[in-house]
Image (cartoon, rainbow, N blue to C red):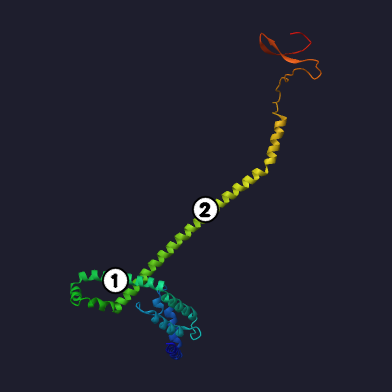
């Protein structure tokens, strides 16, 4: 198997050594003009190709447009597109996705054809008489292949649009969550700064309160306050006490020993 593959590569190299520059340039243009979402088109393969067909076709086309052999300014880009196409078609997950879209396109075209046959009595009778061969022949025709190619493009485009739209929504949601997180962090930061400032002025506030308590409340300007009641003066020369009249306190103050009450 290894020797046959090597021999085949040598034959291909020998063959493409004689290919004209115009043919190489045309292939570069063809590859770069393909529908970007369908690797089958880049490798110019039918949709029912097997992985071995993919590898074989890639070897053939890559030799045709290889930058060392092709002078086209976009040869390197075309060569890279072929490599990407092979990678996708050899990846089982990607291949299954593509085949699912191809099958969905076929079903849509079959449903459309069935609806058309209901209106075309002659074609309907012919389809019934040939027991399905009529439909098989149609699906092998170039007309059907071209319709299928365009329908696959349509479905792949719709799926890609949905994917990008979903990705955009995910990005927007991630952005919103990030913004909320930043706002929450900023709120807690401001709260901590406020608490630190409040704690930093604690000693000053306590000191101010102590000074206030020591000095007492200041009297309003012009207000006359009565002296505090004392049992006697420090020198025991007189005693201040309220004078009473008829059991009630009056505002006069008298000296003890100056006169009897």
Q: Tag 2 or tag 1, which sits nearer the N-term? A: 1
Residue, disc 2: 180
Q: Which residue is pictured at 52% across the width and 56% down the height?
A: 178
Q: Which residue is pictured at 32% across the width and 76% down the height?
A: 146
**Residue 83 drawn at (x, y percent):** 46, 78
Q: If the image is split into quadrants, where does the N terminus sit?
A: bottom left
Position of 57 relative to 225 (above/below): below
Q: Residues within 10 Å of mark 2 (few under 14, many from 20)?
A: few
Residue, disc 1: 109
Q: If the image is split into quadrants, where does the C terminus sit?
A: top right
- 133 sits to left or right of 155: left
**Residue 198 drawn at (x, y percent):** 64, 43
Circle number at residue 160: none
Nearer the viewer's eye, disc 1 or disc 2?
Answer: 2
**Relative to the observer, which residue lies in front, 96 or 74?**
96
**Residue 134 drawn at (x, y percent):** 23, 77
Say whether marks 1 and 2 touch (CB < 8 Å): no
Q: Which residue is pictured at 36% across the width and 73% down the height?
A: 99
Position of 219 relative to 205 (above/below): above
Q: Which residue is pictured at 29% across the width and 71% down the height?
A: 109
Q: Residues within 10 Å of mark 1 (few under 14, many from 20)?
A: some
**Residue 164 drawn at (x, y percent):** 43, 64
Residue 168: which quarter of the image? Answer: bottom left
Distance Cα–Cα, label 1 vs label 2: 49 Å
Q: Secondary structure at mark 1?
A: helix
Position of 180 relative to 147 (above/below): above
**Relative to the observer, which residue lies in front, 79 or 193?**
193
Q: Secondary structure at mark 2?
A: helix
């Amino acid at each position: 198997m290894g020797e046959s593959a090597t021999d085949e590569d040598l034959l291909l190299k020998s063959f493409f050594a004689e290919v004209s520059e115009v043919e190489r340039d045309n292939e570069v243009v063809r590859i770069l003009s393909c529908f970007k979402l369908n690797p089958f088109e880049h490798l110019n393969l039918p949709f029912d190709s097997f992985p071995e067909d993919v590898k074989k076709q890639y070897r053939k086309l890559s030799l045709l447009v290889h930058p060392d052999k092709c002078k086209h300014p976009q040869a390197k880009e075309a060569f890279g597109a072929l490599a990407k196409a092979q990678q996708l078609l050899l990846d089982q997950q990607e291949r299954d996705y593509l085949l699912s879209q191809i099958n969905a396109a076929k079903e849509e075209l079959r449903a459309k054809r069935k609806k058309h046959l209901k209106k075309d009595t002659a074609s309907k009778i012919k389809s019934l008489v040939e027991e399905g061969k009529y439909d098989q022949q149609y699906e092998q025709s170039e007309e059907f292949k071209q319709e299928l190619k365009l329908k696959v493009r349509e479905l792949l485009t719709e799926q890609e649009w949905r994917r990008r739209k979903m990705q955009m929504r995910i990005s927007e949601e991630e952005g919103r969550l990030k913004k909320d997180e930043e706002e929450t962090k900023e709120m807690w930061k401001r709260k901590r700064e406020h608490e630190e400032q409040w704690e930093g002025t604690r000693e000053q506030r306590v000191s101010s309160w102590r000074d206030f308590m020591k000095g007492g409340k200041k009297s309003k300007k012009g207000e006359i306050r009565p002296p505090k009641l004392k049992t006697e003066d420090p020198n025991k020369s007189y005693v201040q006490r309220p004078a009473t009249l008829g059991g009630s306190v009056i505002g006069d103050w008298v000296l003890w020993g100056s006169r009897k009450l």
